[in-house]
Amino acid sequence: MRPAETDRLSRECAVFCAYLCGLKPSAYLLAKYADAHSKVPDFHPRARFDRLLVALAATGPRWARLADTYARVFAPRATLRKKLILLVALLEASAAHAVLDMVDSGGRLVLFFQIVLRGALFGLCVVLAAPVFLPLQLALGTPANLTGAKH
């Protein structure tokens, strides 16, 4: 893998880690993330919109949240979703799993409000992301393999 590609993947991994769990990736995570990209072609977006979605998501955790939320609703098979799932699996298999496995305390009422708050945040992100990404998706075209439509 070329050094420029390794640097890009390292930055991407760092942003996605910050978005997913608020941590900086370890050397292990960076190596495994790059290794997976060298072996699995599905982690390399081919469609123009798919490439743009990954590129914008990699600019920062807020953009990652907006792009992920948008992709979840409008392009569930996008490369961004695959990359995030890969990273969650790598985080789960690393020392960072302790952060992912932490249980919030506070009882049922606190849990209820956390669920409501997360649902509201998701809804807000859909409302904010749709006007940004939907015109781009329409302009750049979206292959059926991103939307989950049958071929």
Image: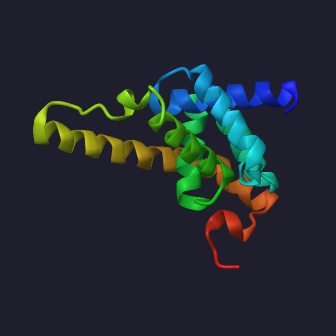
The residue that appears at 73% across and 50% down in the rendered structure is 40
Whether residue 59 is visible = no
Total of numbered circles in the picture?
A: 0
- How far across and how far down the image is residue 102, in percent? 29, 31
- Pick the front one: 104 or 136: 104
Q: Position of residue 71 (x, y in %)?
A: 59, 53
Q: Does 12 appear above or below 23?
A: below
Where is residue 7, by image quadrant? Answer: top right
Viewer-side residue, 74 vs 151: 151
Residue 20 seen in the current view:
yes
Left/right of residue 84 with respect to residue 100 in the rendered view: right
The colour scheme applied to this rendered structure is rainbow
Question: Where does the C terminus fall, quadrant-wise?
Answer: bottom right
Residue lying at the far bottom of the rendered structure: 151
Whole-percent x, y for residue 128 in the image: 54, 44
Q: Is 94 placed left or right of 120 in the picture? A: right
* 102 to the left or right of 3: left
Q: Residue at 78% of width from left, 28% of height from top?
A: 6
Is 107 or 102 nearer to us in this picture?
102
Position of the N terminus, as image quadrant, is top right
- Quadrant of the rendered image containing residue 37: top right
Residue at image coords 52%, 48%: 69
Residue drawn 71% across and 34% down? 34
User: Would you identify the image quadrant in which residue 66 lies?
Assistant: top right
Where 60 falls versus 66 (above or below)? above
Q: Position of residue 59 (x, y in %)?
A: 68, 29
